[in-house]
Amino acid sequence: AQSVTQLDSQVPVFEEAPVELRCNYSSSVSVYLFWYVQYPNQGLQLLLKYLSGSTLVKGINGFEAEFNKSQTSFHLRKPSVHISDTAEYFCAVEQGGSEKLVFGKGTKLTVNP
Amino acid sequence: GAGVSQSPSNKVTEKGKDVELRCDPISGHTALYWYRQSLGQGLEFLIYFQGNSAPDKSGLPSDRFSAERTGGSVSTLTIQRTQQEDSAVYLCASNSRRDRAHEQFFGPGTRLTVL
């Protein structure tokens, strides 16, 4: 069965610093990859996704992620974070044809002034 | 256009009672999903409806859980004889499989507390 590992449960950073949130998944066979963000007391919002093509994908709010098939990773990056980026971030995988998402445990990003 | 809506936003119930949680997907979306978000387990898939096909129930944790989708639109998740371990946020999502965009749109969730 597909599994997703988010290596850091919490990441504290200072405002304007770069950040990388790590995500690894168990199988590279025909997967679609996603990052979702959840602000406090809200639902999940899609940040970006990889379906095919260029391995570097850009999303909303200045975030980007790179699909690395050999390392089965899909790390999320932002060069300069803002206080408003404080939220929980979830990496998710849809194995081709399964039509359901398998989520990582989430990473809580806290941006401090 | 409205997004996915869920009701109630919060539900407190006593152990042993039945509860019903409602999801209104985005109009025109043929696929509807239920997920559960809990502290210990993270986000887990529960059930998936696609058009008139038989639902994928592979994520339902026990036979106390069931869901239906009427008229291809609104869905109700029912938990019978609730237990304390059912306490979680229940999230609904929908998408249009026809556009092949694979993006699921999530509702705000229903926070269920079983006392």
Image (spheres, rainbow, N blue to C red):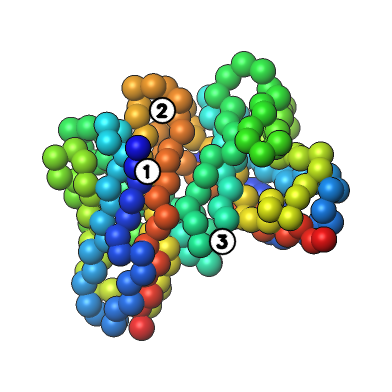
C-beta proximity under 8 Å, tags 1 and 3: no
Q: Nearer the viewer, residue A46 or B64?
A: A46
Number of residues whose C-alpha sits closer than 10 Å to that of mark 1, classed few (under 14), some (14–19) or many (20 or more): some
The answer to whether A110 appears left or right of B42 in the picture is right
Q: Name the residue under label 1.
A: B3
The residue that appears at 42% across and 46% down in the rendered structure is B106
Q: Where is residue B101 in the image (x, y as percent from the top left)?
A: 45, 25
Relative to residue B18, is residue A37 depicted above or below? Answer: above
Q: Mark 3 points at which residue?
A: A40
Q: Residues within 10 Å of mark 2 (few under 14, many from 20)?
A: few
What amino acid type is highlighted by mark number 3? Pro
For marks 3 and 2 on the same chain, the one whose residue lies earlier in the sequence: 3
Q: In this view, does B44 lie above or below B40?
A: above
> Which amino acid does the dot numbered 1 rest on?
Gly
Q: Mark 1 lies on which chain?
A: B
Question: Which chain is disc 2 placed on?
Answer: A
Q: Which amino acid does label 2 sit on?
A: Gly
Describe the element under mark 3 as helix, strand or loop: loop
Taking depth in this image into account, of A5 and B6 the one nearest to the observer is B6
Q: Which of B96 and B51 is in front in this view?
A: B96
- Disc nearest the viewer among 3 and 2: 3
Q: How far apart are marks 3 and 2 (CA)?
A: 32 Å
Alpha-carbon span between mark 2 and mark 1: 25 Å
In the picture of the structure, the residue carrying the numbered disc 2 is: A97
Real-space Cα separation, disc 1 to disc 3, in angstroms: 18 Å
**Contact (CB < 8 A) between labels 2 and 1?**
no
Q: Residue furthest toward the front?
A: B1
Question: A22 left or right of B10?
Answer: right
